[in-house]
Amino acid sequence: MGAQARRERLAQLVAPILAEAGLDLEGLDITPVGKRRLVRVVVDSDDGVDLERIGEVSQKISTALDEVDVMGQSPYVLEVTSPGVDRPLTEPRHWRRARGRLVHAPLVAGGQVKGRVIDADETGVTFDVDGQSQVYAFSDLGRGKVQVEFRHDDAAD
């Protein structure tokens, strides 16, 4: 089985497990690591993901992998994780999950926007930029990036 076919079959295997847990599949990678393969499943949800949910989903995925031959005879290591803060915001759901966060995004027409995400829907995102609301369609934005803040005082906004 080729790498792409294996990845697609694995995605089909984990999709119902993640749906049952209320999680979205954000990424799926199979990487050779010595004589083993690392199977990394990246999950997220609008409510966030805690370690307990990741542990439960990891056990279910592991059981499902053991019941089918999608990984063949080669040993593998399963890693189920949530996306890091450095994940680019590319989908409407990513922008929704960034509500309240400081985000920097290039504008397709040139320039950039840096502001706090107030709201996001299926068509665009509303930023608070220096106390002013600015609305951008997703088609006007490049890949957004959440800015790491060590301290954010809601009262100061």
Image (spheres, helix red, strand yellow):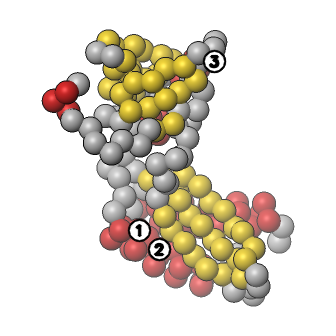
Question: Disc 3 on helix, strand or loop?
Answer: loop
Q: Are marks 1 and 2 in contact (CB under 8 Å)?
A: yes
Q: Which label was assigned to residue 108?
A: 3
- Looking at the rendering, which quadrant does residue 146 occupy? top left
* Quadrant into which the C terminus falls: top left
Can you identify the residue that label 2 sits on?
A: 58
Q: Residue at x 41, y 62 (%)?
A: 20
10 Å crowding of disc 3: few (<14), some (14-19), many (20+): few
- Residue 8 location, x and y as percent? 70, 60
Closer to the eye: label 3 or 2? 3
Earlier residue among tags 3 and 2: 2
- Residue 118 location, x and y as percent? 32, 26
- Residue 98 location, x and y as percent? 39, 38
- Residue 125 location, x and y as percent? 43, 23
Q: Residue at x 28, y 15 (%)?
A: 131
Q: Tell me the amino acid under the disc marked 3.
A: Val
Can you identify the residue that label 1 sits on?
A: 54
Give the Cα distance between marks 1 and 2.
Answer: 6 Å
